[in-house]
């Protein structure tokens, strides 16, 4: 999701979240939902914490998050009316005789306009240039729900800024212990984050969320957290782009055009396929050096070329990369497909330049059934990147 092409500094909203159920529970009582606008210029995210834990809390938080997301994406949303509607719609807890779920709603566009509403959750954190900055807010209450105080903030974010918001399972981590009798204090976790951003200024949102949840769990006895924990982060930064060129063009007269496009591309560049690498090597007069250390792997070895981040074999590597992405669990093998998968996840906008000339070798009926035509493999990979990893993907066939 990127700014318009003519923006002087396109902003990308790098979003991440991490979640951990209360110890002994298999269902999280927190809910996190998000939605991008159809034009791709706005992101709305909602974090809700349901009363208690387990199934009942999950129902409360999920209903709240879904309703809040629906209200928040409406241009003429009245925050107070929306909050009252949400509270009135929630089922009543039979034990405590109340309907209750907190929420944090963040509405951000790619030009840095931020609107944020909180009710019941710990106050959000805002970091600029790696340092915490307090943002002014307006406090208001509902006449119908006297114990529901809400806070509304409206401010402008810039490149490099970060917003963190989380459930009280994070801020109350370790509560009642000797080291943290009142929980993980705001001063303490702000200090931890400040050091983290100083040491790793470009750390991704996903990594930040995972660190926050991990650090919170460390404060619990035996790492057994007594509440659900959820952390979400938005990071406003320049867009990272990647080009993957695979397959020779249908018309060989376009070889030079494709090679020139690769050379001028402003981002990471990957070539997949021996013929593809030969085209770029010939047209740009750059040598290809094969990495012979990879000969013992179950995939063809990678190669190196000046100005190119990665050079791999074609359809076998692409097929394996798609499988790695589908089954992603945090790490990739150290081979061509694993390195390609890492590059894909490191970037925000992925451009595929796909040649449509048929490779006769791939028509052999004795080849594995999972080896599809290059076009189908790229379509499969693009779907995974968009639906599972929220990447912006563009495919150009030549």
Image (spheres, helix red, strand yellow):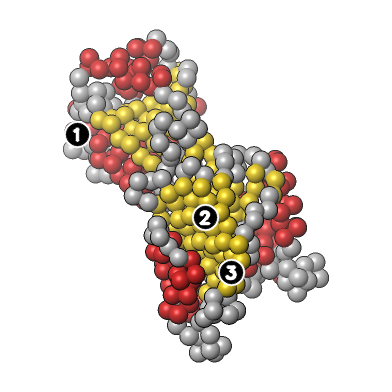
Secondary structure under the numbered disc 2 in the rendered image: strand
Going by the image, does 319 lie left or right of 196?
A: left
Distance between mark 3 and mark 2 Cα atoms: 15 Å
Question: What number is the disc on residue 140?
Answer: 3
Question: What number is the disc on residue 364?
Answer: 1
The front one of 221 and 199 is 199
The front one of 165 and 330 is 165
Residue 91 placed where, x, y %? 45, 82
The residue at which mark 2 appears reads as 115
The front one of 392 and 340 is 392
Secondary structure under the numbered disc 3 in the rendered image: strand
Q: Which of marks 2 and 1 is in front?
A: 2
Q: Which of marks 1 and 3 is in front?
A: 3
Q: Which residue is drawn at 63% across and 62% down?
A: 123
Using the rendered image of the protein, determine whether residue 5 is visible from the camera's viewpoint: yes
Residue 173 placed where, x, y %? 69, 67
| In contact (CB < 8 Å): disc 2 and disc 1 | no
Question: What number is the disc on residue 313?
Answer: none
């Amino acid at each position: 999701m990127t700014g318009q092409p003519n923006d002087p500094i396109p902003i990308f909203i790098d979003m991440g979240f991490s979640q951990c159920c209360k110890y002994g529970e298999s269902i999280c009582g927190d809910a996190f939902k998000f939605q991008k606008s159809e034009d791709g210029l706005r992101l709305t995210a909602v974090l809700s914490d349901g009363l208690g834990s387990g199934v009942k809390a999950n129902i409360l938080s999920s209903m709240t998050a879904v309703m809040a997301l629906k209200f928040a994406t409406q241009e003429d949303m009245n925050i107070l009316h929306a909050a009252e509607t949400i509270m009135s719609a929630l089922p009543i807890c039979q034990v405590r005789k109340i309907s209750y779920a907190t929420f944090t709603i963040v509405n951000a566009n790619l030009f840095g306009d931020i609107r944020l509403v909180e009710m019941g959750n710990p106050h959000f954190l805002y970091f600029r240039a790696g340092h915490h900055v307090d943002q002014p807010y307006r406090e208001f209450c509902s006449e119908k729900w006297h114990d529901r105080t809400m806070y509304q903030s409206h401010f402008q974010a810039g490149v490099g800024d970060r917003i963190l918001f989380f459930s009280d399972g994070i801020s109350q981590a370790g509560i009642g212990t000797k080291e943290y009798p009142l929980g993980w204090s705001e001063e303490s976790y702000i200090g931890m984050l400040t050091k983290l951003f100083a040491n790793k200024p470009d750390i991704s949102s996903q990594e930040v969320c995972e660190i926050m949840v991990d650090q919170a769990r460390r404060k619990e006895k035996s790492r057994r957290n007594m509440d659900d924990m959820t952390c979400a982060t938005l990071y406003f930064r320049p867009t990272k782009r990647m080009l993957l060129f695979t397959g020779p063009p249908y018309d060989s007269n376009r070889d030079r055009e494709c090679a020139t496009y690769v050379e001028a591309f402003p981002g990471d560049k990957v070539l997949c396929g021996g013929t593809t690498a030969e085209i770029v090597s010939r047209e740009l007069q750059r040598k290809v050096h094969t990495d012979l250390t990879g000969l013992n792997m179950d995939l063809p070895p990678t190669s190196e070329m000046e100005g190119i981040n990665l050079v791999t074999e074609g359809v076998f590597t692409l097929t394996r990369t798609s499988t790695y992405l589908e089954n992603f669990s945090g790490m990739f093998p150290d081979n061509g497909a694993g390195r390609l998968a890492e590059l894909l996840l490191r970037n925000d906008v992925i451009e595929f330049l796909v040649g449509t000339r048929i490779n006769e070798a791939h028509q052999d009926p004795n080849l594995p059934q999972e080896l599809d035509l290059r076009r189908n493999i790229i379509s499969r990979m693009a779907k995974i990147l968009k639906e599972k990893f929220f990447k912006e993907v563009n495919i150009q066939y030549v």
